Image (spheres, rainbow, N blue to C red):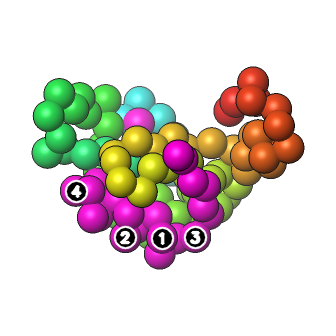
Amino acid sequence: MAQATTDHETIRKWAEGKGGKPAAVARTHDDDSVGIVRIMFPDAKNSRHDALTEISWEEFFRQFEDAELALLYEPDSMFSKIVGRDTLEKRQHGDRAASR
């Protein structure tokens, strides 16, 4: 079952434990903006990361906080989804259709 967190150390430890790295969607990333953040798993079988650019954890978490994001993840798998904290709150109150 998926868990949710905004804790930076939890996110970093979970991602790195699965071989994950902080990334940004390349078309949204430039010198002035980190853009849309993701966690990529470059060593995962069938993984596609052509559209992602590796960034530092510092850049990742700056954008993560600025955009008020949260991570949904499964501790024992590589499943993860970055969502808005408002979406997370709606889901926690039973709105399963909420997404962002």
What kind of residue is marked 1? Thr
Image position of 93 (left or right of 18):
right
Q: Which mark is residue 10?
A: 1
In the image as oriented, which residue stretches furthest toward the top? 97
Tell me which numbered mark, 3 or 4, is placed earlier along the sequence. Answer: 3
What kind of residue is marked 3? Asp
Q: Gap in Å between the C-alphas at discs 2 and 1?
A: 5 Å
Q: Residues within 10 Å of mark 4 (few under 14, many from 20)?
A: some
Where on the picture, by quarter, is residue 25?
Answer: top left
Residue 78 vertical position relative to residue 48 in the rendered view, above or below: below
The part of the chain drawn in magenta is: 1-25
What kind of residue is marked 4? Gly
Q: Which mark is residue 80?
A: none
Q: Quadrant of the image for the C terminus?
A: top right
Q: Residues within 10 Å of mark 2 (few under 14, many from 20)?
A: few
Q: Secondary structure at mark 2?
A: helix
List the residue tagged with mark 3. Answer: 7
Q: Position of residue 32 (x, y in %)?
A: 51, 50
In the image as oriented, which residue stretches furthest toward the front? 1
Q: Residues within 10 Å of mark 1 (few under 14, many from 20)?
A: few
List the residue tagged with mark 4. Answer: 19
Tell me which numbered mark, 2 or 3, is placed earlier along the sequence. Answer: 3
Q: Gap in Å between the C-alphas at discs 3 and 4?
A: 18 Å
Q: Are marks 1 and 3 in contact (CB under 8 Å)?
A: yes
